[in-house]
Image (spheres, grey):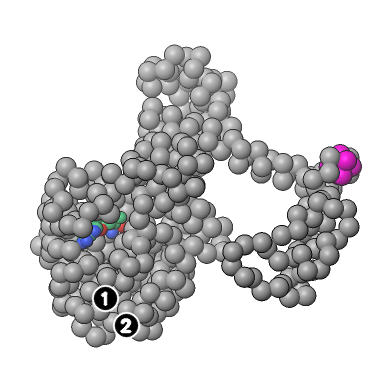
Amino acid sequence: MDTGSGQGLPARPSLTVSTDLPLREPGAFQALKIRLRLWRNRQIASPRFRSIVSRLPLLRAISNRKANHLFRLTSGFVHTQILSACVSLSLFETLAGRALSTSTLATRCSVPPEEMRRLLEQARRLDLVTRVAPELWMLTDAGTVLAADSGLREMIRHHDMFYRDLADARAFWSGARGETELRRYWAYVRGNEPSALGNEEAAPYSALMRESQAMLADCILSSFDFSRFRSVLDIGGGEGAFLAALGARHPTVELALFDLPVVSELARRHLDGKGMLHRAQLHGGDFTRDEIPAGNDCVTLIRILCDHDDDRVVQILSNLRDSLPSGTRLLVAEAMAGESEGANLAALYFTAYFAAMGSGRCRSPQEIIALLTQCGFRNSRQMTTTNPLLVTLVVAER
Ligand SMILES: C[S@@+](CC[C@H](N)C(=O)[O-])C[C@H]1O[C@@H](n2cnc3c(N)ncnc32)[C@H](O)[C@@H]1O
């Protein structure tokens, strides 16, 4: 493609991209867009232009905003590490519901006072804490959410692993990832026999899923009415955290769960602890090939399809189609790619996460609908939720 490095507009034929694939010549409208963008980029690349802009009040505000955005991208890893340090020192739980001085926090977090002050200052710059008087600190809104949500804190702790996988950015994004920590952690994406997983492999990820389910469950239950169903089967339901939340919200709905044998045993313990075991049927098996129990008018796949590549998704959905009676409602719930700010942030994060895991991807609702249709599900449609950063829904009918 013409880089636009010359001063005049590039000659018309050079607007095609140079690649192995033959591309169509852009239409008149696209060609105009490309030319305008090339012109604009040439201005912005010029130090003289930027210097003029910085002297004009209105344009200065715009250019400063763009410079701040670029610097935020450049330094984002520092922000992440400050958050990670605050979580690992239990700063948010320590400050929950009170104002504390620097020296008290230093003692409680076992950090020397000078270092504590510096970390608190950094946390204040990130709007995690606020200084209400000299040397006296409280949580902000974001800090309060972090203190209240143990699942969010567990995800941030879990990111230590993800961060190490991302350390060699060039190798990571060039596909030369080798064995990653996340692939070892998510044991079921590695082998062909997930049913044979033992407790030591399944328990860590199951606990993380249980803890982090709270934020999702509320969003799903507020966005989709389960009260019209007699019985809901959560396929790949983990320890049953979503079912427990559903059961609490809809006391008459019967509950059922299907997961790997070792995980459905963990679910037995969790649902027992929540006083829900008497309402729940638990099943162990492999959702790509074992028969899925019938007798439920709704089945859910929560954070399941995103874990798997398309060929495996087709196996899962085909197995569901063959097992479930016609008319069963299927609900797919996971973070999906989209145009809203939340969906865009989710896609950015999960695209990297699944690349590190070596399996799955963050799909758009349209891609999920296409896979469902390919596998014989009818009337698929997207439903918006209260928070597309966390989850988008696709419903379909067997
Ligand atoms: C990402 S977790 C999601 C758990 C739960 N739905 C949630 O959102 O908290 C994926 C779940 O799928 C289960 N799973 C993975 N492969 C499976 C298979 N072949 N058959 C049955 N369950 C499987 C895992 O054990 C795990 O509980």
Say which quarter of the image contains residue 344: bottom right
| Secondary structure category for the residue under label 1 | helix
Position of 275 with respect to 102 (left or right) is: left
- Three-letter residue code for mark 2: Gly
Query: Does the stretch in magenta take in 96?
Result: no
Question: In this figure, which residue is indicated by the disc labeled 2?
Answer: 376
Q: Nearer the viewer, residue 167 or 74?
A: 167
Q: Nearer the viewer, residue 275 or 368?
A: 368
Query: Does the stretch in magenta take in 50?
Result: yes
Question: Measured from the top left, where is residue 308 in percent x and y?
Answer: 33, 61
Instruction: Work out whether 63 lies above or below 293.
Output: above
Q: Which residues are magenta?
A: 48-54
Can residue 331 be seen from the camera position used here?
yes
| Residue positioned 54% across, 32% down in the render | 78
> Looking at the image, is mark 1 or mark 2 earlier in the sequence?
1
Can residue 150 be seen from the camera position used here?
no
Say which quarter of the image contains residue 63: top right
| Residue positioned 37% across, 58% down in the render | 360
Question: Measured from the top left, where is residue 330 in percent x and y?
Answer: 30, 75
Q: What label does residue 318 carry, if any?
A: 1
Circle 2 crowding by C-alpha within 10 Å: few under 14, some 14–19, many from 20: some
Q: Are marks 1 and 2 in contact (CB under 8 Å)?
A: yes
Circle 1 crowding by C-alpha within 10 Å: few under 14, some 14–19, many from 20: many
